[in-house]
Image: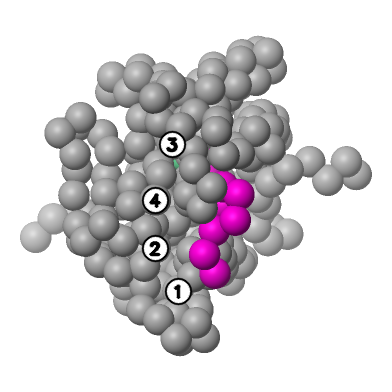
Amino acid sequence: MFRRRNTIEVKTRGELDAMRRAGLVVARTLDLVRRSAVPGASTGELNELAEQTIRDADAVPSFKGYHGFPASICASVNEQIVHGIPTRDRVLNDGDLLSVDCGAILDGWHGDSAVTIEIGTVPDRDRALSEATRAAMEAGVAAIGSAARLTDISHAIETAAQRSAAEHGVEYGMIAEYGGHGIGREMHMEPFLPNLGRPGRGPKLTSGMALAIEPMLTAGSSEAVELDDGWTVVTADGSRAAHWEHTVAITDDGPWVLTAPDDNS
Ligand code: MG
Ligand code: MG
């Protein structure tokens, strides 16, 4: 028997406004990285661009030095699922699938977001994999508006992934060991948010909570392996992977995507 904890922090509107400002730095950074991620570019160059963009906004790259991580973005290519280390030696090729994860701290508040980028022209099945992952993330975001408990979000993510797989006539692997998380004055806070599982479990959700929602899907195995560098996580069978993430707040008006690009409104 263990004591059930409900440790999701509740933020004020002013605190969520501050998180939005951090989220916008991340959104702008990922937008610039996406536009520079072309065949011939290296993941190391993209990392330098990201770090400069974050620092120019008077923010701090949250990944750099996090448990010793050596860079400001994670750059995960093809069979790499998450936590790939960007280097000048890793030059992107036409047809690569690149997942970029980025975090920034502004005035003490964190934003955390990831996108999968098609380098040049990728095979249709890789585009479908990325679209399925993005749709699963969006289903998780939408579920925040109606979710009573944490794993209602997990269930929505898993259901959306399965729906896409059926539509695409394939099976997608889901990685159970990695998932979303609470976020605020730290990047990784309670609770862990699984990307799959039964609904109706975990802490109750209320307005003012902030969660990072980040499904990752593979074109094959649900088994993940960490490389000897201590960071890079790859698919066990070498199949390609995609990863999408947004930081989202629960508000009385529904989900607020704090890392969405500015709509200039
Ligand atoms: Mg992230
Ligand atoms: Mg995250």
- How far is the residue under mark 4 from the one under mark 1? 19 Å
Dot 1 alpha-carbon crowd within 10 angstroms: few under 14, some 14 to 19, many 20 or more: many
Q: CA distance from mark 2 to mark 1?
A: 8 Å
Mark 4 = which residue? 78
N-terminal of the two: label 2 or label 3?
A: 3
Q: Is residue 162 left or right of residue 67?
A: right
Task: Quickly name the residue at label 3.
Answer: 75
Membership of 113 in magenta stretch: yes
Percent across and percent down for residue 37 are 59, 37
Give the CA separation, mark 2 to mark 3. Answer: 16 Å
Would you name the residue on which mark 1 appears?
A: 161
The disc, 2 or 1, on the residue closer to the chain's N-terminal end is: 1
The residue at 52%/64% (across/down) is 123
Q: Mark 2 near mark 1, Cβ–Cβ under 8 Å?
A: yes
Mark 2 Cα within 10 Å, few/some/many (few <14, many 20+)? many
Specify the amino acid type for callout 3: Ala
The three-letter amino acid code for the residue at tag 2 is Leu
3D distance between C-alphas at marks 3 and 4: 10 Å
Determine the image quadrant of residue 262. top right
Of callouts 3 and 1, the N-terminal one: 3
Of the pair 162 and 238, the residue shown nearer to us: 238
Which disc, if any, is residue 217?
Answer: 2
Name the mark nearer the viewer: 4 or 2: 4
Q: Which mark is residue 130?
A: none
Q: Which residues are magenta?
A: 112-124
